[in-house]
Image (spheres, coloured by chain):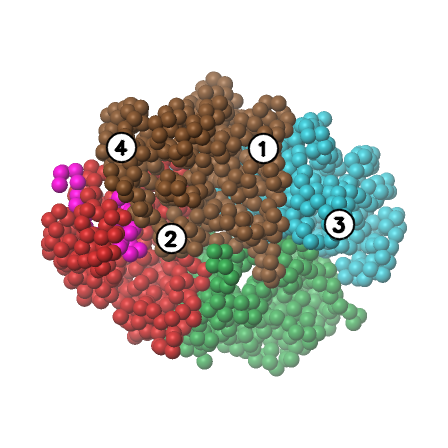
Chain colours: A cyan, B brown, C red, D green
Amino acid sequence: MTRSEIGVGLIGTGFMGKCHALAWNAVATTFGEARRPRLVHLAEANGELAAAKAAEFGFAKATADWRALVADPEVDVVSIAAPNPFHAEMAIAALEAGKHVWCEKPMATRREDAAAMREAARRAGTVAALGYNYIQNPAIRQMEALIAEGTIGTVNHVRLEMDEDFMADAAAPFAFKNGAESGYGALDDFAVHPLSILWRLAGPVAAVMAEQAQPYARREGRAVETHEIAMALLRLESGASGLLVANRAAWGRKGRIAVQVFGSEGTLAYDQERMNEFQLFTRDGDERLQGFRTVLTAPVHAPYGRFVPAPGHGLGFNDLKVIEAHELLAAIDDRPARLVDFDTGFAIEDAVHAMARSHRDRAWIDLA
Amino acid sequence: MTRSEIGVGLIGTGFMGKCHALAWNAVATTFGEARRPRLVHLAEANGELAAAKAAEFGFAKATADWRALVADPEVDVVSIAAPNPFHAEMAIAALEAGKHVWCEKPMATRREDAAAMREAARRAGTVAALGYNYIQNPAIRQMEALIAEGTIGTVNHVRLEMDEDFMADAAAPFAFKNGAESGYGALDDFAVHPLSILWRLAGPVAAVMAEQAQPYARREGRAVETHEIAMALLRLESGASGLLVANRAAWGRKGRIAVQVFGSEGTLAYDQERMNEFQLFTRDGDERLQGFRTVLTAPVHAPYGRFVPAPGHGLGFNDLKVIEAHELLAAIDDRPARLVDFDTGFAIEDAVHAMARSHRDRAWIDLA
Amino acid sequence: MTRSEIGVGLIGTGFMGKCHALAWNAVATTFGEARRPRLVHLAEANGELAAAKAAEFGFAKATADWRALVADPEVDVVSIAAPNPFHAEMAIAALEAGKHVWCEKPMATRREDAAAMREAARRAGTVAALGYNYIQNPAIRQMEALIAEGTIGTVNHVRLEMDEDFMADAAAPFAFKNGAESGYGALDDFAVHPLSILWRLAGPVAAVMAEQAQPYARREGRAVETHEIAMALLRLESGASGLLVANRAAWGRKGRIAVQVFGSEGTLAYDQERMNEFQLFTRDGDERLQGFRTVLTAPVHAPYGRFVPAPGHGLGFNDLKVIEAHELLAAIDDRPARLVDFDTGFAIEDAVHAMARSHRDRAWIDLA
Amino acid sequence: MTRSEIGVGLIGTGFMGKCHALAWNAVATTFGEARRPRLVHLAEANGELAAAKAAEFGFAKATADWRALVADPEVDVVSIAAPNPFHAEMAIAALEAGKHVWCEKPMATRREDAAAMREAARRAGTVAALGYNYIQNPAIRQMEALIAEGTIGTVNHVRLEMDEDFMADAAAPFAFKNGAESGYGALDDFAVHPLSILWRLAGPVAAVMAEQAQPYARREGRAVETHEIAMALLRLESGASGLLVANRAAWGRKGRIAVQVFGSEGTLAYDQERMNEFQLFTRDGDERLQGFRTVLTAPVHAPYGRFVPAPGHGLGFNDLKVIEAHELLAAIDDRPARLVDFDTGFAIEDAVHAMARSHRDRAWIDLA
């Protein structure tokens, strides 16, 4: 490997595995990176599938044994897009092997596994980042910048909604995600996404009061063990109040992550289903002309211009992963990067576990 | 007074007083009522203003003494649009004088006053209705009908938001509404409106867990005693879960009452800032064509057609009061009417008081 | 009649007749007029209906003979809401009797009748106004003010669309509006409305190149004689370019009047189906924050505040007629008024007739 | 080269050159193509830039001489993304060298050059396709399918708008696009895009009546030779009526391509600025529930699912090029493909030239 390349290993070829592969294929062309990724090794539980996907995705080697990939000296960075229960073992092994790690969210279903991952990352000294791609949207980046600049004043109230409808069909069979082994339900499956945005826009959560609900108690005669709906009252460290709700059974919502941030001088709003725009209201100027403006993302909102030089032409879901890959490469090169690392990732998941306890105890829980 | 007329008295000539006057002037022309209102008597604390407004609004007599109005034998129905602290005394006096009463919301700032009003109404036997005009919107009526017909299946989750920005300016002086004597803040000033809609669409609340927040703790050096922001987790009697938030300091929101109702077969959504439309998603039919449809209110959504025979031409805020007046006249004539009476009105306000206790005690409160 | 009253006669009790009646009932209460309308005389071709509607609408006298109404010395102003073919005869008679006239649009189906009305108005010296209610919308008024103030710079391009779907059903029977005696079709039935807005926002039309189309050539085996679709390229006197399209067969459009005004410094947009808001883009300020803002009408947009003192609460279609009535009363009292008089009304209809000739001759037509 | 690869040459590395490079890098991973593109040769007028971009984009060889690329036996398909005036010479040379050609739109600024390209393609027998990427949007594809299936009945009226604001600044200096050598202006620069969509959704244009306008006659004291605004009345071969407008000086519009298609049973609408959704109204079913529905694209709208398996997550502008590359590979393999070939591309540009003549002659022009 020449100095200008970096060797990539990818574990998993499903939804997010393919998304990582697309990002690794696109990042150099998009950003003109000094370091061009070399797609070295692909792991997938099924060996035949591994070989087929390696050919499709452009990886040189394929394996059914992810440990072989982690041990491969040509691999510098490991993308982990395997099912959630494997994240901890894989990430810790990769970190211990001196690799950089780019792991899909959530870190783990169990709090202690996430804590172990955090510790491994602290020990390793390599880059350990989580796949919270929504925060990479130029619209979210711009909102974060505006809040930092004081455009909407001091943030005093935040609302977060995340809704999809893949669990909305009452007649659907009992699925893996209906069992307790998959986690809490909407709380960990969904809520971490809006929380990752919240952390960027308004900072950490200090206390939570949560409630979960089951729209359908049984499927195929079997008791559903997860909750499709999670709601929480929030108190942020900043003192701002907040509200969080997630629903996997919300008919008609497909990829909704709705964010409203209220400040002393204005308001920002966003909906992931229209990811190329955000809404801004500021209370300054001629009162007759005040209103929420719809800002279409554009080259003035970096790094949009790396994808398209014309404004309002639109990025897609997969483009966010390309930005994330670029940030990861920056971090690897010790340049400033905007990522969710394992420390912040743990804090987000810790808030989720606190919400589950709050639901159980019907009480407010303070985060340490 | 002939059989075809009904004598009207109006107390108060501010925002809602004028709104009542407009409704009384319009209801017969709009609905072709059998009974035409006769505008008999107007009361306003300032006698000169009372006379001027009586001339403007078309009332025959004016007084600075609301008790004279209540005692006037020509008055059959009393519109109460005086400041909230006077509602109880006026409504009870009018009911005891055998009048019908149309009182603006809320009933009272104190729970015991509202309870006394409810008792007076039960004793009186005349019609006692509250001014919850938003439920009169043909869009809300249609949503209610669709839910009753099962168009979205069983309701399992509801979200309610009410936001305006008249308290958003941090530099504004200390106002009446910042003092404890005005009530809790957003909780009673705002939340009763979305709750009145909730009651129609999804039924009563069974339990609440609430939190209030102050975006600005002080004004003019004086501690603010109310909360501009109120949030609550809800459990409905039906078993559905819910979320309620109200914010009087939400920059850019002007008359937002956003409602989302999720059911087992679809979803309904509404925003009062676009009051002539609602959103409906149903999961039936060709999956390629599914999406939220924006339904513009039209003559097929009664009683829209009484105002305009063409669809999509739009009603306004004041038109909702005309519908309410029509419902009131129906109730007076013992015909079926769709109103918030003093029993339901008390239940709504009782939920609000429970939320205040929940905030204080940081605990879930069950409603009796 | 005392000095503070004005006697009103109304001819016609259909869609727009009822709308006039509502406006006459509401204008004094809404605006606190010095002059309160007295509802003197109602005319309707059917005498029994006239009597019934007079009772409903609050008129003192009823007649089947509109000439009796015009001759009534108690009547000061005549509202004409009879079918279009009668407008000319009625308006001219009323003007010659010294009455003020408030006539629904269009003036007449034939150009020469409209010309005769214009001449009668010039001779009479009383107020003669047309019912172009859409221009009374506070949103349109505000857009007009912004253009006058230069907020969007010099207007260089305008687009106007008016669409409804009451003629969209191919299987509907042959109706009056399908016959040549009703006029051209969308061209005169619809296009005059957006043209009335155009005249306010960007001034008169100088040249037209038009085309009409028939989505359905036959109904019930009979040739349709009108055109449901009309389109025109426009050149304005100001030099700006423009586009006009009207469609009475546009499925799903209910009351759409979409206006886009492009200027050298910004853009304004409006849609009558969301009549309580307009869109504004200006190119000034921080480029990262530029976007179309949605301005909700509010008390800062006169005369919105006469209806509701709170912003964003919404006016309705009928409220626009109340504003028009107020302007009419101002004109009668020799105060400045914002109305479409018979001169401008004729110019608008003249443009429509020119479009019809352009369609016939397949050529540009210059307006005199 | 093995059987499973195809050799790619790319001429040009600007906006669209980079877009092609991204597509060539992504298409195999996205679609699991049998044939994986091999990035062989990159040409750019400046040799140093060529080398730098070849490294960034992943091409093996770089050249300042596009003829060397065309002559390269390893190159099977040539992407042409050089400035428009060079398209004809390059495309004809590549076709004559037996290569497949993927050329950015428009074919040429002069009609005779486009005609020569068409002839070369007919002679060559290889695949010759144009870069009309907007038609590749799953939303547009779905609209096309719905129209073909009769979901909105017989199309009788179409409206097309394309607007951006890069020419809106009156004070900007005289640019290449203001000179006659660049073409007509909005007419050829923009209008071909909505026309490519029109051709898919409603078929060819039969007659045009066009008008062009200059918002700013001079820049830097020099007469502007192009027109930023173009408008046309259309008659389609199907008999439907249509309207086309394009504006490069439309403040606030960034990538708007608004399409409205009216049929005898419903209406479809689309706006490129919200490219992941379309609007559909159908007149069937319960009239109380009719409204325009917003359909978010999803895996049910092929080939969306190749990018993201979850609905409503959003594609971007660059993804459309990946779909186009996939179609091109299908055509090369003699499988059915959905592309704008040089025959249809010529017909589109022929319509544009007819519009220019119509503007000049102020007359309707029939297309042969």
The one nearer the camera, D285 or C95, is D285
Label drawn at residue B74: 4
| Residue D268 position in % (x across, y down) | 50, 62
Instruction: Return the chain for callout 2.
Output: B
Q: Is residue C332 visible?
A: no
Q: Earlier in the sequence, mark 4 or mark 2?
A: 4
| Mark 4 vs mark 3, CA separation in Å | 66 Å
Label drawn at residue B305: 2
The one nearer the camera, D268 or C7, is C7
Q: Residue at x 76, y 54 (%)?
A: A14
Quadrant assignment, res B45: top left
Contact, mark 2 vs mark 3 (Cβ under 8 Å): no
Residue hosting label 3: A221
Residue hosting label 1: B232
**Residue A167 vs residue B134: left or right?**
right
**Residue B182 vertical position relative to residue B101 in the rendered view, above or below:** above
